[in-house]
Amino acid sequence: MKIAVIGGGIVGTLIARLLSFYEADVTLIEKENDVGWGVTKANSGIIHAGYDDEPGTLRASLVVPGNEAYTQLQKDLDFPFMRVGSHVLAFNESDLKTLEELYKRGEKNGIKGMKILDREEVLSMIPKVNPDVKASLYAPSAGIVIPWRVALSASDNFVMNGGKLALGERVVDIEVSGGRVRKVITDKNEYEADVVINASGLFADEIAKMAGAESVPIHPRKGEYILLDTQEYTNYVLFPTPSHGSKGMLVVPTLSENTLIGPNAVDLPPDKKGDVSTTESGLKEVHEGAKKLIPSIKLNKVLRTFAGLRPESPQRDFFIKESEKVWGFINVAAIRSPGLTAAPAIAEYVVEELLQQRLKINLQKKREYIKSIKSIQKVSRLSIEDWAELVRKDERYGNIICVCNRVTEGEIVEAVKRGARTLDSVKFRTGAMCGPCQAARCAMKIAKIISREAGIPIEEILLNADGSNIAVGKVRP
Amino acid sequence: MKRVEVVVVGAGAAGMAAAKGAAENGAHVLLLDNENWVGGILQQCIHNGFGVHRYKEELTGPEFAERLKKEIPSDVEVMTGSFVHKIFPEEKKLIVISRRGIEEIHYESMVFATGAREKTFQSLLIPGTRPVGIYTAGQAQRMINIDGYLPGKRALVLGSGDVGLIMARRMHLEGMEVIGVVERLPYPGGLRRNVKQCLEDFDIPLYLSHTVVRVEGFPRLEKVIVAKVDGKFSPIPGTEKELKVDTLVVSVGLVPVKKLLAKFVDVESGILVSNSGQTSVDSIFAAGNVTTIFDLVDYVANEGEKAGKNAALYAKGKFEGKRIPVKKGEGVKVLHPKWYDPSDPLSVYLRVSRPMERAVVRIGKYEIEAEDLTPAEMVHVEIEPPCEDEIVVSVTEV
Ligand SMILES: Cc1cc2nc3c(=O)[nH]c(=O)nc-3n(C[C@H](O)[C@H](O)[C@H](O)COP(=O)(O)OP(=O)(O)OC[C@H]3O[C@@H](n4cnc5c(N)ncnc54)[C@H](O)[C@@H]3O)c2cc1C
Ligand SMILES: Cc1cc2nc3c(=O)[nH]c(=O)nc-3n(C[C@H](O)[C@H](O)[C@H](O)COP(=O)(O)OP(=O)(O)OC[C@H]3O[C@@H](n4cnc5c(N)ncnc54)[C@H](O)[C@@H]3O)c2cc1C
């Protein structure tokens, strides 16, 4: 059985990982130079409790199991994740009514531990909250995650089990004959395939068209963010009470000890799937929105701004289905929020329900496969004794390269060993270059390490995409 | 574990001078730096203009560092490639990470001289894409001068401080096309001699009262959109201009690197010290750009040397710190030091809040006449005032 998974986001990598436990020949195809650089890299990073989703939708049925799956998934894939809990804050009577509805919906969806807290309780948990707050819906099962780390670990695990990872290859066509998928054609290669899983995020409609399969139209909805170099505002994820289906502007603590504020929501036409630029009005909106929750939020410690694009479709639900027109083609499309949360459950649903039940593909578990991996050791989080021990074994763990986040040469070398060839690949694996100096002090040092370890000349080292060479030439002698 | 009398954190100009000052006063000194060399930022400043006061000569950065290094007594222990990871002021110890291992250093007194880092483009909230090709000036400087690589072909510089001006010239001399320097202030941010020697001599235009409002292009920078600004630095609609460049070099100020100590000592933008270099914690001294951003390395070295001397005296129980407040009066934007300790002369460094043609600088009861003051150029006055409750420093235009 030959299976091609298109798209190395959180969804595609988790599906590919699960498939790598079975006797199958699986190829994961990703157009970018690393996994996790699509929708998966620019979002709120929240593992939602799951009260937003209307019971009866596919989303609702996947989000709570997805949330629960994170406990085991973290153990297996060793990525940063913490159940910090979330609050939906209510500021008026109509908000209070909505909280009640969310609570009821949450119960139907099977969420455990939710509580509606009164003003005093909210103030004591979040001292800097807007004092106009009336109540909150508190959900202890909500968490925060570093989403690209899930994709990276899943893809590493996939490769360890013999999966083939095709990075930097764009799918340009899908060959179909006799009502079945036959081949996936990229700008560089061709892959024979009995089954094609379309997990290409924003581009899922275009990929489905290549196969002549059913699709839902997808347009991007931009969300802009400001990342602050402080965690003084809140230890919990804070939402305003939702209105008109939008979650509104949030204040989110991150696992790199920062605070994320945003996102706004701006619908873009379908031809703007690459437009992740930030705008003046958007950034203003984000700050104003966040101040409604925490009035004291200031923009004096800005690390950076960014934007992500939600893959929106008119029907609003996930579109996860085998094609009725083309046997072997499976859409995992329109994975809008809370796609991160649902992703582990989506992967199971695709492999168990769609492949095995509906397509009746008899997948055999491999006799031996690896299910859990260790991610790169973050040495500055170790105890001094353990760190010292590591330096005794390998002196490179004593050479600090990223001074802001204390990332050592040893960690960077390990990232290169695991396939990192660009600066962003090192950044997303190690956390280097994410601190207050934003790579100004260490980018070149890291480029030299990649160059030395992988044998690539400095001028060919990329920041991320092809064409992003960090140097254009040598200074004349 | 290791025990020293004075530990110096950071071996830039301030740290090297502190090591010298402390050793010459009889202390057993350890000088630490994370880089594999001493000299700090000086090593990447290959232009002339260092040491006019201290050595009465115009040296390059590395030459200045070499001179200063020679002045450090040979009994000072120097450990490069050594990163100070944590400081425990109450136990007077710090943890150093290096390839040789992780070591605990116990000290009697410390001189903290970790310098400054550059403010980033990303922190400015300028909207647009996030392409390759945007560098801080120091990053571009290090890339060109130390690593030997060119960041791009056609550049614009944001910020007319000295670092920005010097980088405009450097890139021009290396064969890049430098299409201009953009500055939001109505006057240049750097020294006048640098405006002449770095821009005017090479016909590089300076756009005053302008700023960058947006960047475009991905994965490489393609366009920078600039606009005129009003008195409050807000872009004036309708004045936008598109400039096609692949490189934007950003020089919008330095930020003291104070995180390791910020929880323990009094800080504002930098670590606060008295004129003897002492912080709010008796055993900790600080000097150089981590205290305030100095224009001249000569000032940095002098302050470092003094802090080193006093740290040595403290280690030997011969230093009693006093802290008489030195306060900002009218016309003063930046003032250094925070306190006056009569055991040393009072070296006052200040920046005026706006350009003034003729002015009177008042330091407590002293009055000094001055001409041609701009915020870009630090004013330095050394006096020995009597002890008072506080000393107010002001500048009035006349
Ligand atoms: C602003 C915002 C906030 C969000 N917040 C949350 C949240 O807090 N919690 C939550 O649970 N969810 C959240 N989400 C949703 C979540 O981020 C997404 O549902 C999830 O990341 C989707 O993952 P994916 O793998 O489907 O898509 P992607 O990560 O986009 O993966 C698809 C991959 O396919 C590749 N690809 C596309 N076309 C081709 C081609 N032709 N050939 C080869 N490869 C191709 C892409 O490069 C990409 O890497 C948010 C989304 C946004 C935008
Ligand atoms: C581009 C440029 C041009 C300049 N031009 C001139 C000029 O023409 N004339 C002039 O007089 N002055 C000039 N200056 C100013 C002058 O060079 C500086 O003011 C001076 O060198 C600063 O010295 P410092 O010791 O405070 O800091 P730095 O030189 O920054 O030294 C700090 C040192 O501390 C180390 N460090 C930091 N944290 C740690 C840690 N945790 N553990 C270990 N080590 C650490 C760093 O590695 C660094 O080596 C210029 C500066 C620049 C950037």
Image (cartoon, helix red, strand yellow):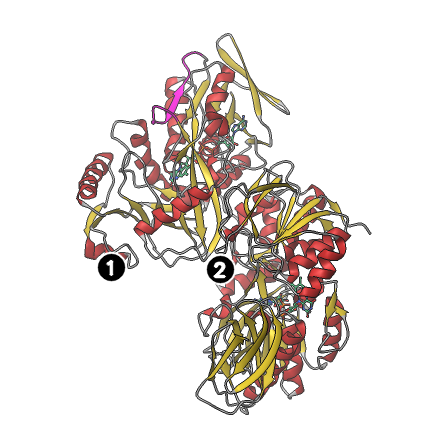
Main SS of the magenta part reads loop
For this orientation, the residue located farthest to the right is A477
What's under tag 2, amino acid-wise?
A: Leu
Camera-side residue: A401 or A74? A401
The numbered mark, 1 or 2, whose residue comes first in the sequence reads 1
Camera-side residue: A223 or B81? A223
**Callout 2 secondary element:** loop
Where is residue A272 drawn, in percent x and y? Answer: 49, 29
Q: Would you say B310 lies left or right of B272 here?
A: right
For this orientation, the residue located farthest to the front is B398
Range of residues picked out in magenta: A313-325
Where is residue B48 drawn, in percent x and y? Answer: 75, 66
Q: Nearer the viewer, mark 1 or mark 2?
A: 1
Q: Chain of mark 1?
A: A
Marker disc for residue A382: 2
What's under tag 1, amino acid-wise?
A: Ser
Q: Would you say B48 lies left or right of B10 here?
A: right
Q: Is mark 1 within 8 Å of ligand 1?
A: no
Q: Chain of mark 2?
A: A
Q: Would you say B44 lies left or right of A244 here?
A: right
Which residue is tagged 1? A124
Q: Is mark 2 within 8 Å of ligand 2?
A: no
Where is residue B314 drawn, in percent x and y? Answer: 54, 87
